[in-house]
Image: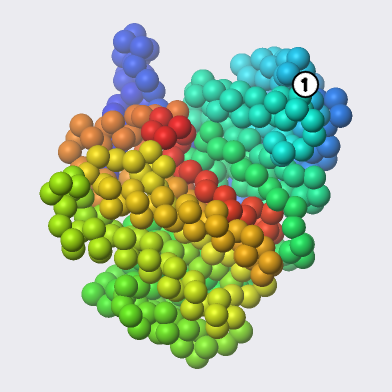
Amino acid sequence: MADRYQQLVTSPLGRQVADVLSLPVPEPLRRYEPGQSLVEGLALVGEAKGGRLLPAALAVLEDAGADVRRTVDGSENPYGALVFDASGIDDSSRLRELYEFFHAAIRKSGPSARLLVLAGATDEGDTRRRTAQRAIEGFTRSLGKELRQGSTCNLVRIAEGAEDRAASTLAFLLSAKSAFVAGQVVTLRAGDEPLAEVEDATRPHAGRVALVTGAAQGIGASMAAVLARDGAHVICADIPAQGESLARVANHVGGSTLHLDVTAPSAPQTLVDHLRERHSQGIDVVVHNAGITRDKTLAGMDDARWDSVLDVNLSSQERLDEALLEADLLRPHGRIIGVSSIGGIAGNRGQTNYGASKAGVIGRVESLADEMADRRATINAVAPGFIETAMTARMPIGVREAGRRMSSLGQGGRPVDVAEAVSWLADARSGAVNGQVVRVCGQSLLGA
């Protein structure tokens, strides 16, 4: 559904009215299109003395052909990226180095600029270092809420030993693919998973097989399209009643269909049998997107509403994953990705069932991360905020407008925003991202 308010205040006349009345102006976001540059404009980089992470960022920027600058100069071209390595900050007094870098440059940042702070893990070093490194998180989240024109600010914590595994994450957060990912903290872990390489960075999933449940429409259909764009053969799964829509999606992305009710007792074996018959070498990516809502306050909620939401959104994931792992069908560099929600983080009135199920997805990600690392694989989740879908279009206008405006970006996201984050987490080169829940919410004020 079109955002009429955004259309109004970004029109020439509407912008004048918004300026006079001091109304918020949610700028159209720069989103990814094949062939576009990683950074639009100059890239300014800096580092605190003793930092160890800037080379990783420079490698990504230089590989992409970005015009990298080390100091603020007199150029009239705006900055499309501001990257600061704060890993060397080991005392609270040195946080001023972070302030000085961004204070001098932020006025020259352009529309949809990417501000990126690099830091160490908070469990490394002595008390003063840990204190200073933790303070960086508050700085980053707060700065993100001050930005305008569709710009974002995120923090990447890179543990010692994970420096050579940061490229896919840095490229994602610097690019237009992360348009609705704002105010996030992503931690990269060192691990034993062999470092993956891809022949074509624009098709990182080439030769891989991905499963997307709930793929017949909405966010699931967008996930299928983006994973296929990035080279994967996508198995589009959904309930038999969605067969016609599912076939359209699969045909559009060049994938295949699997009629699967994830709550059926036979579903785990049906999936295993399908993979053994059609993809005997196993599967690379599993995206648990199937989900439902059955809203009611707890006092008025019947058993069916509770049971159906918990079964579709959470328990089915447990059963399918257990079957896949027991059958040893998840290949090396395997990626399991759940779909949580800010409702599972902040809670929503009338959604005790939904909130419990989506918080449970987070619990699975956190509790299974070590086991998945032992398997040379990962498990992560995305947590969407307000995304423009057919479901949100049916909301009362007041609720819909509140959902759109209650974020740093002042607008709703699109299904493709969630799909881009899923494709990043699915990347074979993203092995350092494990046990993470990344919000795709435009830095929503809910649960912030």
* Residue depicted at 59% across the width and 81% down the height: 328
In the rendered view, would you say 165 is above or below 386? below
Q: Secondary structure at mark 1?
A: loop
Q: Residue 156: which quarter of the image?
A: top right
* Residue depicted at 35% across the width and 61% down the height: 313
Q: Quadrant of the N terminus?
A: top left
In the rendered view, would you say 16 is above or below 286? above
Judge whether residue 79 can be spotted in this image.
no
**Residue bearing mark 1:** 91
> Which residue is nearer to you in this view: 324 or 367?
367
In the rendered view, would you say 311 is above or below 360? below
> Which residue is nearer to you in this view: 317 or 240?
317
Q: Amino acid at mark 1?
A: Asp
What kind of colouring is applied to the model shown?
A: rainbow
In the image, is 306 to the left or to the right of 13? Answer: left
Residue reaching furthest bottom? 277
Residue reaching furthest top? 20
Residue 70 position, x and y percent, is 81, 26
